[in-house]
Amino acid sequence: MNRPRSPEGVDKCALPLDTAAEKTRPTRGERRLPLKTKHRIRSPRVAAVLGRRIEGRPRAAAILAFAAFLHCSPVAATFSDVTVAAGLNYEHGYQEPLVGEDGSFNERRHTAGGVAAGDYDNDGWIDLYAVRGDTGPDVLFRNQGDGTFVEVGAAAGVAVSGTAGSGPIFADIDGDGWLDILVGGVQGAGVRGFRGRGDGSFAGVDFGMSLPQPAPSSFRRGSGSGEEMPPGGRDTYSAAFGDYDRDGDLDMALAHWNVLVEQGESTETLWRNDGDFHFTDVSVDSRIAAILRGTANTFFDFTFTPNFADVDSDGFPDLLLAADFGTSKVLRNQGDGTFADVTDTRVVTDENGMGAAIGDYDNDGDLDWFVSSIWDPDGVAEEHWGVTGNRLYRNRGDGTFEDVTTAAGVRQGYWGWGATWADVNNDGFLDLFHVNGWGRSAEYVPSRDFYRDPSPLFVAAGDGTFTEQAHDLGIDDTGMGRGVVSFDYDRDGDLDFFIANSQGRPRLWRNDGGNEQTYLTVKLRGPVGNSEGIGARVEVVTGDLTQMRELRAGSNFESQDPAEAHFGLGGYAVADAVRVIWPDGIETILTDVVAGQRLVVSIPEPTPTTSPTLTPPTPACIGDCDGSGSVTVDELVRAVTMALTGASAVSCPAVDRNRDGSVAVDEVVAALDRVLTGCIKAERAP
């Protein structure tokens, strides 16, 4: 991989020295794991102004040069398997063999599984909730902030056991500011719900859905372990949340693969949130049931992965359904509670739509749709599957799509499942990763090509094309992947991958070196009813490039990415602008935003102005931007950058000790002292 160049064409690591250091972040528990950090020049602007803006201040010049020197390293993004070290020690499986003595194969259980990702305790670190089949209780891993996780499922009240759960998802269903959990399931597992109490624990809830039998929502009240449906209800593999009717709360879409829908029955796809965990099935009223049914009286619903996404940019979330056997759909939100089928069957041609990734991969301001499918290397369908592989549908800008799969080079992914967009090298262009795997055994001839197939990582070239580089970048994954998460679990500025495998152990792939280039993470605090700002768009401008993310509580297939926006900024130390378009259309605009931080933006109060409310953490000492109790080299370089560029200190008030809104050299010196000597416990930034 070529070393990235700055916007001005200057080699960012041209200084003669580079280094790598080990740091240990503050921990909330006893276990500590050193996190490897690559130090490098954050921007050519830093090198360009060294010794120029601070003439006559030799000590200050030396300090700034030292900070710049620490941030130069020509290391490219590579991945390391840190599953065991991170404490993610569980296994998914079933007590009974999936292959019967008569040769039958339990496809439903083989398909089910997954993982949810979200910050359920609101401490700024992404946690994980995973289902385990029936070999043990489902697990909730709390991120300890030091590179490790601790399992707290039993203490939190979510350690459900003995079921075939599937597609867990975090979402603030009741809009109280704390994430809740919904878990689907197959073969009698049912749909379970857990309300986040705000103290790290959950309570089982009755969603109060009124549905005909059988249904995933015919609950009986449990005893703290979630709510279950009676045996015989519909299987639910994946779920997604979004405010389709724009009434301020999160509605729900469910996927029920391989379900027979009789004449007159609802497909039970779209559920309207009526408040207090009560949902109403509106699949018929919204016309979705009729669209999926087509002209048939009785049909099978083969939907695997639903996603709310505003593909035509009209402010109303549309619905994208990745579905098996050529039944994927594009449903346009009409703005009146109904949907229209705008699927162009000449374009949407995936044969076995399974997983999905939604994102603006070409940076043209609209949402594109990747659908994982089956690519058979011998080109022959030994059994009931297609052979032509994945599909990448590029948005033309009006909510219609064109198939650019071949031109982009993302077709070959074997038996694909969960998929995610992630800028792994922070170059400003989304890369693509998906998991895969299928088969009853390695000896079963028809599916042996997929039993240990490698998960692909397609790295963007920046021109709309991709190159598969998983093996070259250290990812050697051949498990039975179902769910996948892209998230910065260690908060080092680059995106890592977590894989939930069926009938096996998970994998956590840590990104080492993706933070060679700068980044910006944006977290929103939305209004009551939609606390994560689901459906809002975040745009980041650096030079001539504008990147866009739409915040989603969506599905990658039986999995989700956390509802925050990560942007790679290439060689820029400061983003020219950050623009948030809230679901109600109000805009928040920030300028000259310093890179290398997690920026929290709250929705403005209903006043004539739209000035943002930034919520910085409580500082522990001078320069401690994230309130962790220590000052890291990254935080020092942020202070250096603010001092050199004149950027506002609003994103790190801990370094602005005289409260004048800017950062002076003396304040940088004080921050460096804290890096070298540590924080004084009694100290508080004034």
Image (cartoon, rainbow, N blue to C red):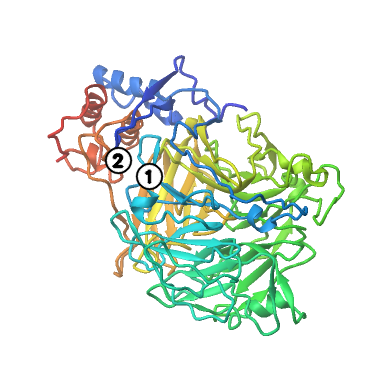
Marks 1/2 in contact by CB < 8 Å: the verdict is yes
Residue type at tag 1? Arg
Q: Residue furthest front?
A: 101
Where is residue 554? Give x, y as percent. Answer: 53, 59
In-front residue for pair 242/129 = 129
| Label 1: how many Cα within 10 Å (few below 14, some 14–19, many 20+) | many
Q: Quadrant of residue 207?
A: bottom left
Q: Residue at x 65, y 52 (%)?
A: 110
Q: Is residue 549 above or below residue 667?
A: below
Q: Residue at x 32, y 63 (%)?
A: 604
Q: Residue at x 63, y 36 (%)?
A: 477
In-front residue for pair 197/616 = 197
Q: Is residue 33 above or below residue 615?
A: above
Q: Is residue 51 visible?
A: no
* Residue under label 2: 626
Mark 1 or 2 closer to N-term?
1
Residue type at tag 2? Asp
Q: Secondary structure at mark 2?
A: loop
